[in-house]
Amino acid sequence: MDRVGFVGRKRELADIAALLTSTRASDGAVALVDGDAGMGKTTLADEVSRRARRDGWRTAWGACLEGGAAPAYWPWAQVLRDLGASADRLHESSADADPSARFRLFDEVIEMLRGSSANGLLIVLDDLHWADTASLRLLQVLATEVGRRKILALGLYRGKDLPAGDTTSVLSAIGRERACTRLTLGGLSDDEIARLAAAALPHEPDARLVRVVQDRSEGSPFFALELLRLVGEPGGSTGTALPRGVREVIGRRLDSLTPATRHVLCQAAVLGREFTVGELGGLTGQPPQVVLDGLDEARGRALVSEGVAQDFRFAHALIQEVAYADLPAVQRQRLHAGAAAAIGDDDARVDALAHHLRRAATLGSADAAMAATLRAARRARRQLAYEHAAFQLGQALELFPLLPDQTHVRADLLLELARCQFRSGAVTPAWASCQQAAELGRAAGDAALMADAATVLRGISNTAVDPVCDEINALCRETAPLLTGDPVREAKVLAQQAITAYAFASDGSTELSDRAVQHAEASGDPDARFMALQARQVQLVHPRYLLERLTNGEHAVQLGRETGRDDYLAWGHLWRLDAFWELGRRQRMDRELADYAAVVARMKQPLEQWRLTMVQACQAEMRGQFQQARALADQALLIGRRNGHEGAEFVHLIVRARIARLTGHGAEDAARDVGRFVESSPAGAHAWLAFQLLEMGRVDDAAAAFRVIEPHIGEFPQHAPEWIPATTGMAYLCTRLSTRDTAAPLYEALLPFADRQVVAGAFTGSEGPVARSLGMLAMQLGEFDAAETHLRAAVQSAIDMGSPPYEALTRFEIARLSLARGRPENGRTAASELDTALRLAHRLGMRPLQERISHLRAEQPARRSPLSRREEELAALVAEGMSNRQIAERLYLSERTVETHVRNILTKLDVTNRTQIASWVAGRSTGTRTPTSPR
């Protein structure tokens, strides 16, 4: 019964076969296979691997171990060894605490996998519900890149046994990737169980026995096989005497072993699902041959399987779990202590050492358990496996009830735990650890500890009501007055207080950041200096501080060069890029973007790559390359999702919604998603929804949304980073939906910033020149001369920025202005501007603008031509590009007569050349109002 043929799973095999076919065509995938214990996940993967190898694929396996006994990246280390590659890179120490170092590590591992995938590579990762989070993060990164590779990864896990927290959230994130397929294994059918019984038993199975197995196993192939094996053993049960639970079945099978074999097997269970003869001999104190004799019986009963070099493995995790549970508690602890002693001081196995010592801690080894666990945490951090380091530190903290009170050590561990949690992206748990450390500091009167707790979390400015930011800010306010004679910590706390202040409740003062800079400069500490610059950037958001922000960015760049810190350089270049965009300095923007991109390329830091890709998307949008902009924004969203960046979805929506307004592409979806956002947002957010609806032509719905916010116009605080975009957005809605009374205060507020671009940040993009909004407001107010000045400046600004979309939109407004003035010469201007706007809109695919141009032309009243019918006929031929001689030949006139008619046409139309005659003809044919001034 040891080798039972594969039964069932036709649908799952077909699904995976399709994935193998597409993977061979360089369209790789990840498949997550969920199933209860004993449902046959590993057996399915075995069968898939067998078929893949038959077809020339390379295959590699990695299995996760329960209880944190394995080091970080353990399943991936097994995969690399299966492929004949070195796993040393996964276990190397790194002094680089920057998250980009881990990203580079992941890239190197994926490149090693790619090198083994020429004919297709199948990777199986078993028991992912026990995986360390760092291993899951590596799988997540692979899932985002596997689509371009001949790699198929099968991840097997028990969904019902997933621990709460990182494991569940990362697996969910992997499942959302485009390249990921989810499969769920249910039970086998009754017919399949019957076939399994026929294959498993050496004789034709009794029909009554098959029915009992079908009923008891509920389709679980492992349970069914265990029942059948129990029947096949000497003195085995039959019929209704079979046990009803799988653990009871395993227990009965263990009971059928000789006492010596059962004892050896239960001792082996302490070592985990996998063990060697040498490890088991060291634990039991028995020579290898005695151990092998005991294992031979277990192997013959299919309870364990043998690998290479006397490696053994329990046939199923449930067998190991039942055998382990069969040991009395005290004996288990003593065996764990023995296993730890056998490991000794082997640093490569420090995770297993810590695991065994923790399990034996109540026997008096708590100190040793603490030391080993901290070693394991340090090793994980050096490997950049921050989640695994956090796990080990959490285990260390649970040992404190067994140790003498050491408040300072506990506080240090909490802060270190918070740092690891924060580096792994777990912001809320990190802050909870900081709060525990701060409470210890508060109780001990230790202001330095409170300050350290307040400044672990970095770079999370408070632009929305965020409980974490609010609580950090409160701790900073509590701690700052307690710090004396400690300029470094005082600078950091003041900076953190400024950074985490709620932007919309601020009074716009820069006092906090000024003090932070003063203390930081006095201390000379680079970290304090940079935090102070971050605080200053946050507090200098008012448009009047634009040049100061530019200088602040230059200081960050200089600090980065002095210290060799690429993260300081990246922030500095990004701040300067923001400033140059707002100033409308395209060449300086491009230089800063090139510098920023070079730094990001060195860093390979996911968050910076997300920002850079969003900047590139917004620049493509500014140039009118909307398809490229959408592709880049989608690429950035994938980067953000795979690295757990919570703001990625929102920023993507900002850009997607703006492109939808400009092109009409995806307008309904964008409006729906914006509507969902504003449902739980302050009243002012309804302006965004009104904006979307208006550009879709849903004027009544837009007006209803605008009525919600109209009473609050002017309330948006100027020291919020979105003030210019918010105010220009209100201006646009006002000119389309409201009155002159609303326009006047908006015009006065925006006028000091007439030379700016509408931008809150380079990675959220721009709405074009502020001058365009001023021109529209001035037109609403009847100030036509001022409107023309602003709009002409806006056209030139859009041209200088290389932004044809906003050139087209502004030329449309100039046409509206010209028609509003109503003078004949303005009619020709309107026609010309509309022609140019229409050409640009058509070339760029700006369908909403094209429709507005058509509507504007259709609204102009019909008029009587100043030309006679003969003159109109001649004008049409001029518009075709014909010469006077050609016209004379066409109409059988003398050339002199044609010359006379052309002179009369020029006079009546008040134009000076044949090109303008052609423009007049084109205007009449499209319905554009082109007034003339007949003499």
Image (cartoon, helix red, strand yellow):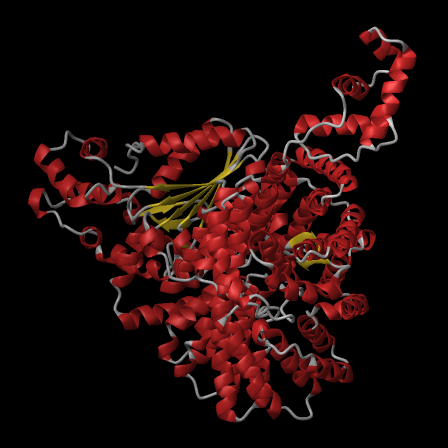
Q: Position of residue 818 (x, y in %)?
A: 73, 44
The answer to which quarter of the image holds residue 366 is bottom left
- Residue sitting nearer the eye, 670 or 694: 694
Q: Is residue 171 left or right of residue 453?
A: left
Quadrant where the N terminus sits is top left
Query: Residue at the location (74% across, 70% down)?
Result: 544
How many labels sit on residues? Answer: 0
Q: Position of residue 188 (x, y in %)?
A: 24, 37
- Residue sitting nearer the eye, 822 or 39: 822
Residue 712 in view: yes
Query: Residue at the location (61% across, 91% down)?
Result: 481
Quadrant where the C terminus sits is top right
Q: Position of residue 740 (x, y in %)?
A: 62, 60
Q: Is residue 575 above or below residue 202?
A: below
Query: Residue at the location (14% across, 50% down)?
Result: 244
Q: Position of residue 784 (x, y in %)?
A: 74, 53
- Residue sitting nearer the eye, 273 or 15: 15
- Residue sitting nearer the eye, 882 or 240: 882
Q: Is residue 139 left or right of residue 893?
A: left
